[in-house]
Amino acid sequence: MINNVSDIKIFSDIPHDELQYITPLLKERHFKKNHVLIFENDESDEVYLIRSGMVKIYRIYEGKEIVLSLTMAGDIIGEVEALSSDNHRISSIEALENVSAWLMQKQDFLQIVDKYPSVLRNAYKILVERTRMLNRMIRYLTFYDVRGKVANLLMDLYYNFGVTLNNVYKIDFKINQSLIANMLGVTRESISKTLGEFQSEGLIDIRDKFLYLLDMEKLESICHETEEFPTLRKWSNP
């Protein structure tokens, strides 16, 4: 749980003794798992600062969900619309688990941007990170077969949620096959089949909905032509 505004990445460079002016502008909100915070194309202007939990950013096309990214504690959502003259939401946001957030009105956020240029610089950095992630997802969707897509996403998930336990690499986030399918633009059946193959080959194990990477070297070999340095698999840099 994030308790200090300074731990929200976009505000991290504001002098600590001046954060007291921002705190009164925040309203605390709590959302249950599966709650949709924002609907695509709705008109609203609040900015959300994620304190705990995780949300997915997605769009619906012809009845199919395409997950664009995952956003975690310390991140901000809604700042793009706040900085734009158009308040229509560009994507939907849904809680993947119970989420705690601070809400800020657009006019308050813009006043902070005007007062502290570092906020705008950090907003650009966040936009670059998200663009890099989207570029990688587009490459997965366009050029790789299912095995390549799944292997690359598993490596991405490890670099963002991974922990090492006795030489076993655990993705410390319960992720279901439907979410993986919607991130990669393939069917859930294809994901189930590919994960089953990876298990049979000794590449991964699945226990209690957690994924364990047993053979990182072989997984990396499937991620050929990824065009990414390992550190660039991070979706958000501190």
Image (cartoon, rainbow, N blue to C red):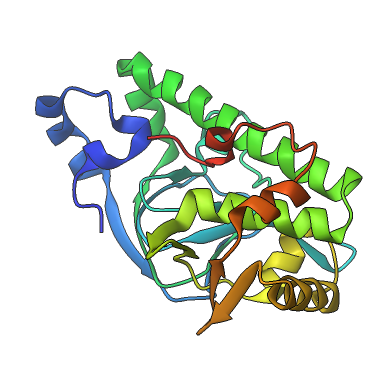
Residue 176, percent from left and from top: 62, 75
Residue 65 is situated, as x and y percent measured from the top left of the image, at: 77, 64
Q: Residue furthest bottom?
A: 208
Q: Left or right? Give the position of 100 relative to 88.
A: left
- Residue plotted at (89% across, 55% down): 145
Task: Give percent across and percent down for residue 26.
Answer: 27, 47
Q: Eyeballing the image, is 31 above or below 106? A: below
Q: Image quadrant for the N terminus? A: bottom left
In front here: 51 or 40? 51
Q: Is residue 94 above or below residue 226?
A: below
Q: Residue at x 69, y 76 (%)?
A: 199
For the point 51% across and 31% down, which residue is it?
A: 126
Residue 34 lies, with reference to residue 74, above or below; the image says: below
Q: Is residue 186 left or right of residue 150?
A: right
- The image quadrant that residue 164 belongs to is bottom left
Quadrant that contains the C terminus:
top left
Q: Quadrant of residue 167?
A: bottom left
